[in-house]
Amino acid sequence: MKPPRAPLFLQRETYRRRRIMDAARILPVVGFVLILLPVLWTRGRALSTAAEAVYLFVLWLVLVLAAAALSRPLRAALKRDAEAAERRASPAPDEGAP
């Protein structure tokens, strides 16, 4: 019998960044499904064109705000990662001196 594996440890910041990236990836799919909802509504009862237009505008606004809310922490996390990678790649100041 194999011994149980140790649980996989992910740093909290890396885990959160990946979940934000997952949410950003799924947002267009959720938006597409929500845009198609008025098609399902018209089968049962007729909604006015104005009500559907208001729904689509509000949905568009919510999707834009959600994308903006997701992009802010993701942009900050990716910037921190790029700065850390740049610091690791640059030589220390005393290494170049003879």
Image (cartoon, grey):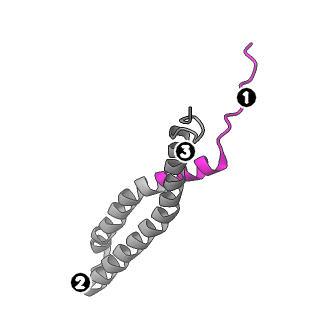
Q: Is residue 13 magenta?
A: yes
What number is the disc on residue 61? none
Question: Disc 1 residue type?
Answer: Ala
Q: Residue at x 53, y 62 (%)?
A: 73
Q: Residues within 10 Å of mark 1 (few under 14, many from 20)?
A: few
SS for callout 3 = helix
Residue holding disc 2: 49
Q: Residues in magenta?
A: 1-22
CB atoms of marks 2 and 3 within 8 Å: no
> Residue 94 appears at what percent x and percent y?
60, 38
Residue holding disc 1: 6
> Residue 82 appears at what percent x and percent y?
49, 49
Farthest front residue? 98
Question: Disc 3 residue type?
Answer: Arg
Does 38 sit left or right of 20 as displayed? left
> Residue 90 appears at what percent x and percent y?
51, 41
Which one is nearer the viewer's eye here, 10 or 48?
A: 10
CB atoms of marks 3 and 1 within 8 Å: no
Task: From the image, state whether disc 3 or disc 1 is nearer to you.
Answer: 3
SS for callout 1 = loop
Q: Residue at x 51, y 38 (%)?
A: 89
SS for callout 2 = helix
Q: Mark 2 or mark 1: which comes first in sequence?
A: 1
> Residue 10 appears at what percent x and percent y?
64, 41
Q: Mark 3 or mark 1: which comes first in sequence?
A: 1
What number is the disc on residue 87? 3
Task: From the image, state whether disc 2 or disc 3 is nearer to you.
Answer: 3
Q: Is residue 69 magenta?
A: no
Q: Residues within 10 Å of mark 3 (few under 14, many from 20)?
A: few
The CA span between labels 2 and 3 is 56 Å
- Image quadrant in which the N terminus is located: top right
- Image quadrant in which the C terminus is located: top right
